[in-house]
Amino acid sequence: MQSRKTNAFLVPILGSLINLVTETSVFPDCLKIASVTPILKKKGDQESLNNYRPISVLSTVAKIVEKNLSNQIMNLSESNFTLTECQFGFG
C-alpha cells in the first residue's frame, strides 16, 4: 500500500515539473547532473585512459521528464505530419 501513497504524492509534483519545463522551455540545471563512472573495455591496458569508456547515470526524475518531453515532441510531429517515412534515426 505504500506505493499508492507515494504515487499520490509524487505524481502531482512530477506533473507540475513537466508542465513548467514545457511552458518555460527550460530544463533545470539540477536535473542535468550525472554521475560518471569509467568502465574498462574488455580488452586493453588498464593503465591507458583510452581503454575506458564513460557511463553516465542520470536521476530518475530527469529520465521521466526527458521521456515525457520526447513523447510530446513525437506526438506533435506525427499529428502535424512534419516527419516523413524517409526520416528516421535511433529510437
Image (cartoon, rainbow, N blue to C red):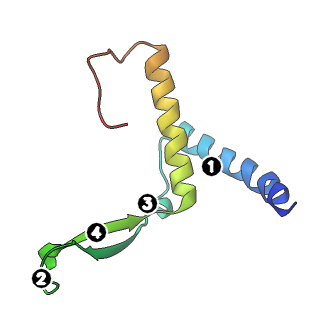
Q: Are marks 3 and 2 in contact (CB under 8 Å)?
A: no
At label 1, which amino acid type do we have? Leu
- The amino acid on which the numbered mark 3 sits, given as a three-letter code, is Lys
54 with respect to 58 (left or right): left
- Say above or below: 65 vs 77: below
Picture layout, residue 53 above or below residue 87:
below
Q: Which residue is drawn at 29% across and 32% down?
A: 89
| Labels 4 and 2: the sequence-earlier one | 2
* Mark toward the viewer: 3 or 4: 4
- Residue 17 is labelled as 1
Q: Who's the residue at 45% across and 18% down the image?
A: 78
Mark 1 burial class by Cα count in 10 Å: few <14, some 14-19, many 20+: some
Nearer the observer: mark 1 or 2; the answer is 2
Relative to residue 72, is residue 2 depicted above or below? below
- Residue 46 image-quadrant placement: bottom left
Q: Residue furthest front?
A: 43
Indicate which disc residue 88 carries. none
